[in-house]
Image (cartoon, grey):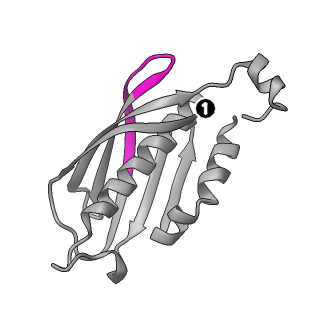
Amino acid sequence: MTVEVIKREFEQSPYLQHLGITIQSFEEGNLELKLIVENFLLNKYGTLHGGVYASVLDLIQRMHLCSVTGTRCKSISSTVHFTAPVKTGAIYAHASIISMTYKTAFVEGILRDADGKIISKGTGTFQLIRVDSKVASAFGNRK
């Protein structure tokens, strides 16, 4: 898959659209996501809900990995560290691959506020979905 195809698939994601995440940059290995903190994303304490942190981290890690490998992937495990609350403004997400084999990858994601302060870090383990060309032809070249 090309970077353009991968980007288009993520842009069409209903969940990404629902959260209000925008893709600021999307190139092979160089991605940035932005999320404007809206009231519907806040918890009962008036801060960004932890599930939003986890979702954005999972998305940036997955998107980064797909952009580098040109394959689809699925989450195997995820860890999130909440380091600072956010009440307003925007958050920005970046990711990097820590290690990768043919079938799996370990990826780190970082969320920062508009001032560049780290508000959350997370790691994820992903299974790379590689389609053997013989298998793909048996299924009508679906990848």
Residue pointed to by mark 1: 71
Image position, residue 14 (x, y; %)? 58, 65
Is residue 53 in the magenta section? no
Mark 1 element type: loop
Q: Is residue 7 left or right of residue 140?
A: left
Q: Residues within 10 Å of mark 1 (few under 14, many from 20)?
A: some
Residue 43, can we see it? yes
Name the image quarter holding the C terminus.
top right
The magenta span reads 93-105
Residue 39 in which image quadrant: bottom left
**Quarter placement of the N terminus:** top right
| Amino acid type, label 1 | Thr
Q: Nearer the viewer, residue 85 or 117?
A: 85
Task: Give the image quarter of residue 131.
Answer: top right
Where 58 sits versus 119, above or below?
above
Magenta part mainly helix, strand or loop? Answer: strand
**Magenta stretch encompasses residue 100:** yes
* Percent position of residue 109, x then y: 33, 43
Q: Residue at x 21, y 56 (%)?
A: 119
Res 29 visible: no
Left or right of 30? Residue 110 is left
Horizontal and vertical percent position of residue 102: 51, 17
90 above or below 69? below
Q: Position of residue 128 (x, y in %)?
A: 52, 28
Left/right of residue 121 with respect to residue 136 in the rendered view: left
